[in-house]
Amino acid sequence: MSDIGWLSNSIAPLHEEDKRQAGARQSSLTKPAGALGRLEEITLDLAAMQGDVCPQMSEVFISVFAADHGVALNGVSAFPQAVTGEMIKNFSNGGAAINVLAREIGAHLEVINLGTINKLPSLEGVLDLQLGPGTKDICSEPAMSSDQLGKALMAGRDAASRAAQYDAHLFIGGEMGIGNTTSATALACAALNLPPADLAGPGTGLDAAGIAHKIDIVRQALQRHEPSLNDPLEFLRCLGGFEIAALVGAYITCAQSGLPVLVDGYISSIAALMATKVTSSSSNWFLYSHRSAEPGHKLVLEALHARPLLDLGMRLGEGSGAAVAVPLLRMACALHAQMATFNEAGISEKGA
Amino acid sequence: MSDIGWLSNSIAPLHEEDKRQAGARQSSLTKPAGALGRLEEITLDLAAMQGDVCPQMSEVFISVFAADHGVALNGVSAFPQAVTGEMIKNFSNGGAAINVLAREIGAHLEVINLGTINKLPSLEGVLDLQLGPGTKDICSEPAMSSDQLGKALMAGRDAASRAAQYDAHLFIGGEMGIGNTTSATALACAALNLPPADLAGPGTGLDAAGIAHKIDIVRQALQRHEPSLNDPLEFLRCLGGFEIAALVGAYITCAQSGLPVLVDGYISSIAALMATKVTSSSSNWFLYSHRSAEPGHKLVLEALHARPLLDLGMRLGEGSGAAVAVPLLRMACALHAQMATFNEAGISEKGA
């Protein structure tokens, strides 16, 4: 079995003094106090994370984890399971949404294949870490073995370590896997003790009958693994996906090594939730990019006390919503660093 | 008196066939239908405006109009009136928020001084079109003469023409002027037939007593000019500001010449509302960037049937909220143009 002892390594502390000094700088800039709204708040959060009064956001590192899900055989997705592998090829060829966005924002992008139903050949730009032909069907057996769980978490840890090595200012994790909203929904139900009907949604495009079926499948999975539902790592093993476990490992490693995380949408937020179940203070290192169109995202975000920056009705995954929010972080940092102060500009202050 | 006959020139038609073809392309891209949410909608809107199946967003032109307001003498702002001129110097020196944002997004930025209480010398990067020492106090007299209104509208028209000459893909108008939320609120009350208490807010930072006073001032202004409140151009003259009238002129000119407009926050949206009062189909050319923290913005956006892209609690003006939204438009255009189609990527379609 793979070693998972590193999961309990300590979480990096925030730099409260840098945040305080950043706040002082912010109130000296030539604008009414608070007039940049959330852009001001996010700058202070980044100052606390980076230990820098003027935080930076030039280097962004994106890892997209892909894997297949045995539960897809129950017909819980609008797309056939073959699409996971086909999309990995699309990532390799640069044609997917996250490829376009990574180019647009000048981010480093890597793709990690954790296991598709039909084994893929080696592909350019894709790290081959296949742990098996996807997970097992969670309705009838655990999604993965303890060894596979340990290796999936480690795949995430290694990605976060590569990001740190790259001197990234921000880590984004993305995911792709037909059937993975079903697995993620089961995890969120277990983590939040909520019924499947509160969280299950259309995913890539189910109709009402499809959602009803998905609710039933999640209920079956939760019943099957009922004895595990008090132990986060154990229900992550039973209900999760390779790519979701990798996100959990990546997020926890970022929090341990002091690298800010920008969380993407529904599935990524559930991975963030699982990370906080494993080690609660990891949440100090998570920023939230967007509110997904997937209706269950609302409850997950509430549980995380998350206030995402964007609400654009996106529901694509791949890290795409987080990538779209990166320019907001960059502009927030640029405003904070480059605006003149009242003193520098010789401007009368409020009520003067 | 300045000629304003151009206001009734025809509004450019939208290109519905390009929009239809853009929609066909969109549904062939390797993502679940609709999964990019508002980014998909905005791409189709831009396709219709630009007459291009793959709309472009590289060249962005920002004109910031600044002017003083006589109504500021009634103590309706948290800042002294001198700040308008001081901020124009700050624009010239590159230290204001819009300077930072324009650099960050690589936009062309120009600043137009339409008249400050103390005449400013010539400043680098600032077009000197001073129409007088700010407007008059709208509580007791019309804000401006017919000649000043015509010149302010024309200042906006000329800015929009420069943007078209620049081959801009998008026009952003910004504003700066101590007291201008009071003037804008009076205009919105007149345009929407709403009481001042429904629209007046803190602006740059009034407390509750300050807002109550502002409501009283707006009520006085509306009473003073009651006979003009059925004629948009006449109440624009009586209640407006030079910079607000310039925005109206710029927006209408963009709509006439087929240049998409990205509207900023509270004051800019009220200028857009005034433009639609003058010529209703100008609204076809307006996109909305963000929901301001100014509480009255909600009602103005509703009246415009506007669904802004961002809701970040910003309330700075200067065109800053619109500038912050530009990367979203760029990413939307890039995704649309660069993503692979299902066919190109050899990916199984939904339900296949």
Image (cartoon, coloured by chain):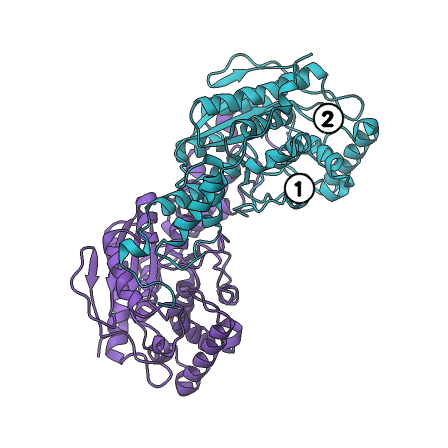
Chain colours: A cyan, B purple
Q: Nearer the viewer, residue B47 or A87?
A: A87
The residue under label 1 is: A300
- How far is mark 1 from mark 2, CA to CA? 22 Å
**How far across and down, in percent of the image, does residue B311 sit?**
51, 53
Please tell me which of labels 1 and 2 falls first in the chain: 2
Query: Counting other residues with Cα less than 10 Å from the Cα at mark 1, is it few (<14), some (14-19), or many (20 or more)?
Result: many
Q: Nearer the viewer, residue B178 or A217?
A: B178
Which residue is at the far left? Answer: B122
The answer to whether A89 appears left or right of A201 in the picture is left
- Work out which quarter of the rendered image holds the C terminus of chain B and state it: top right
Asked if residue B47 shows in the view, the reply is yes
Q: Secondary structure at mark 1?
A: helix
Q: Which residue occupies 25% across, 62% down? A: B112
The relative height of residue A57 versus residue A307 in the rendered view (above or below) is above
* Subunit bearing disc 2: A
| Amino acid type indicated by mark 1 | Val
The relative height of residue A141 versus residue B285 in the rendered view (above or below) is above
The answer to whether A216 appears left or right of A283 in the picture is right
The residue under label 2 is: A71
Q: Any mark on residue A163, and which?
A: none
**How far across and down, in percent of the image, does residue B151 sit?**
24, 72
* Subunit bearing disc 1: A
**How far across and down, in percent of the image, does residue B339 sit?**
46, 33
Which quarter of the figure has residue B338? Answer: top left
**How far across and down, in percent of the image, does residue A3 sit?**
65, 14
Q: How many marks?
A: 2
Query: Counting other residues with Cα less than 10 Å from the Cα at mark 2, is it few (<14), some (14-19), or many (20 or more)?
Result: many
| Amino acid type indicated by mark 2 | Val
